[in-house]
Image: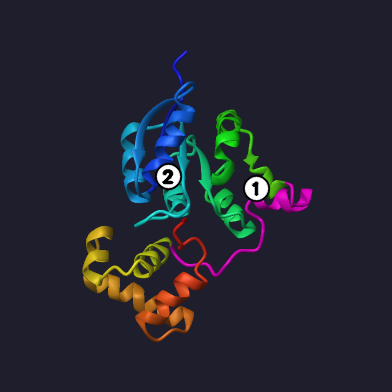
Amino acid sequence: MPRPRVIIADDHALMAEGIQRLLAAHYDVIGICSNGRKLVEEARVKNPDIIVLDIGMPELNGIEAARQLKLWSSRVRLVFVTQQLDLDYLRAAFQAGGLGYVAKQSASTELITAVKSVYYGRPFVTPLLADTMTAVELERATTGQLPGKMVLTARQREVLQLVAEGRTVKEISSILSISPKTVEYHKSALMNELGLRTTAELTRYALARGLLLHRDT
């Protein structure tokens, strides 16, 4: 039988290479991507069985990438590998279509088990989180039922992340393939919705309170 095909997405090259080495004995790694936008593009071309992805990535974070990938294909299995050991991130990852959640700090012992479990349709949550949660909390997290943050549109979340990264209107326009006027419209709508007045305030909001917009370290 052909081996399952995997794409890895992580903007830290050493981490991506380490994941590749862990999986190589059992899976065909058919691509490595350094940001979420490239991941979405490559997955649509190569049609993997499994995607192993970070949460904090430039241009398009892993949660937003997962949402887009699940709209494209409900079949693909998603395993998040992250340093974010927080219930909000866990909930968002599963709500976006993830089925596995692995801690980066223990990926060497968790990842093979997680990928195998997810490939066969069974959820996996790192024991570093699962051991601190009640059965009810775990069930709610893995079904996306824990209380979430303010709901923004997909485009607003993309613009918010790019603003938080310090991108100019021209850069955001190019990355998202929309006009500068449209970028300004989304920024204005975000500021109105969030009660903010300046780009600096919007950036501080995204970095301090905007769920899933920080980069992993």
Q: Where is residue 195 in the image (x, y as percent from the top left)?
A: 47, 84
Can see residue 97? no
Q: Could you classify mark 1 by the number of other residues whose Cα lies within 10 Å: few (under 14), some (14-19), or many (20 or more)?
A: many
On the image, numbered disc 1 is attached to which residue?
142
**Side (left or right) of 144 relative to 168:** right
Can see residue 185? yes
Near-viewer residue (132 or 72): 132
Q: Where is residue 170 in the image (x, y as percent from the top left)?
A: 21, 68
Is residue 45 rendered magenta in the image? no
| Residues marked 2 and 1 touching at CB (< 8 Å) | no
**Side (left or right) of 116 relative to 31:** right
On the image, numbered disc 2 is attached to which residue?
69
Tell me what residue is drawn at x 32 percent, y 39 percent.
42
Alpha-carbon span between mark 2 and mark 1: 18 Å
Near-viewer residue (181 or 110): 110
Q: Is mark 1 on a helix, strand or loop?
A: helix
**Label whose residue precedes the other's in the sequence (2 or 1):** 2
Q: Please provide the residue range marked out in magenta.
A: 131-153
Residue 43, image quadrant:
top left
Q: Position of residue 189 (x, y in %)?
A: 39, 77
Q: What residue type is labelled 1?
A: Thr
Vertical position of residue 137 compared to residue 178: above or below? above
Q: Is mark 2 on a helix, strand or loop?
A: helix
Tell me what residue is drawn at x 63 percent, y 39 percent.
124
Q: Where is residue 86 in the image (x, y as percent from the top left)?
A: 62, 57
Q: Which colour scheme is used?
A: rainbow
